[in-house]
Amino acid sequence: SLTTTLTLHNGVKIPKVGLGVYKVEKGTEAVDTVKSALDIGYRSIDTAAFYDNEKEVGQAIRESGVKREDIFVTTKVWNTDQGYENTLNAFEESFQKLGLDYIDLYLVHWPVTGKYKDTWRALEELYDQGKVRAIGVSNFHIHHLEELMKDAKIKPMVNQVEFHPQLFQKELLDYCKSNDIRLEAWGPLGRSRYLDDPVLEELAKKYNKTPAQIIIRWDYQHDIITIPKSTKSHRQKENADIFDFELTEKDMNKIDELNRDYRTGPHPDDF
Ligand code: NAD
């Protein structure tokens, strides 16, 4: 169910399926979107300072009636705020906007060259202070992770990267698995650009599900944390209705083979 979790290397549990809120407009759209998801049973919300809707996410959580400790909240430090001091300040701002007593997961949004290691020291500090229950990175390749871990006191608990059938980053997934870093998929639906792929459609028919549900289930069976975004209740429900079927190993492989190294977003080395 939506309360099914994976355990991070520090023992903290994160729901396997959550809601992403990138491009959900601040104001009533963001409040309604998060309330609707919490109402359906989502227990993990992925926001970022850059999305400009942290205030609404916090408001929706407070007004939802769901207990704070039952919800997992992720936010991220934006690129222009990186570096040690800047990150501590940016965190304080996100913290105020969310209006929660703690954040569950704080991520370095992108590996800004020359800065991300100082940013990481700030995250370690916030973790030591107990303001965040877990810390991690986003859009890190293997070489970024290796560089970071040379001097890190704490190993990232999560790496959130663009990941979907046409960008099946097998090497990165294996690397994260062997280093106890959980991989989290952003843009899991490939931003809905190829949901009409014939293989996905064929599998959807076979399992009596939709292509979106086939992909989310594929993440689930790969033990990848996934955060599909939708502002619409019926789609939020659809994306959460993946717990009553199982893809065979052969069908999992079929989806793996859809990889084309296709990115909907920037390449982490050129951003
Ligand atoms: P996504 O792959 O989740 O696709 C979202 C789009 O797919 C929506 O706009 C919606 O129109 C459509 N959709 C949703 N459910 C559908 C369904 N069942 N059937 C058909 N279409 C459907 O893309 P995303 O929003 O970019 O990624 C998800 C989340 O990942 C974001 O909201 C954000 O929280 C996070 N993210 C993080 C980064 C990062 O750099 N760390 C970058 C992008 C996104």
Image (spheres, helix red, strand yellow):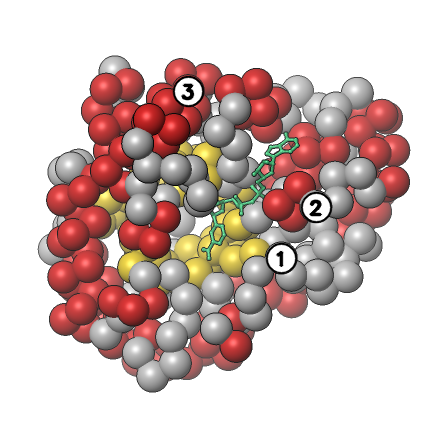
Which element is circle 3 on?
Answer: helix
Residue in view at x 34 percent, y 54 percent:
50
Q: Is mark 1 within 8 Å of ligand 1?
A: yes
- Disc 2 + disc 1, Cβ < 8 Å: yes
Image location (x, y in percent) of residue 192: 66, 41
Q: Is residue 137 above or below residue 49?
A: below
Q: Quadrant of residue 167?
A: bottom right
Separation of disc 2 and disc 1 at Cα?
Answer: 9 Å
Location of mark 2 (residue): 193
Which element is circle 2 on?
Answer: loop
Image location (x, y in percent) of residue 94: 21, 49
Q: Is residue 95 left or right of residue 25?
A: left
Mark 3 closeness class: few <14, some 14–19, many ≥20 residues within 10 Å = many
> Could you tell me the amino acid type at mark 1?
Thr
Q: Quadrant of residue 15?
A: top left
Residue in view at x 34 percent, y 83 percent:
114
Location of mark 3 (residue): 36
Which element is circle 1 on?
Answer: loop
Residue 174 in view (yes/no): no
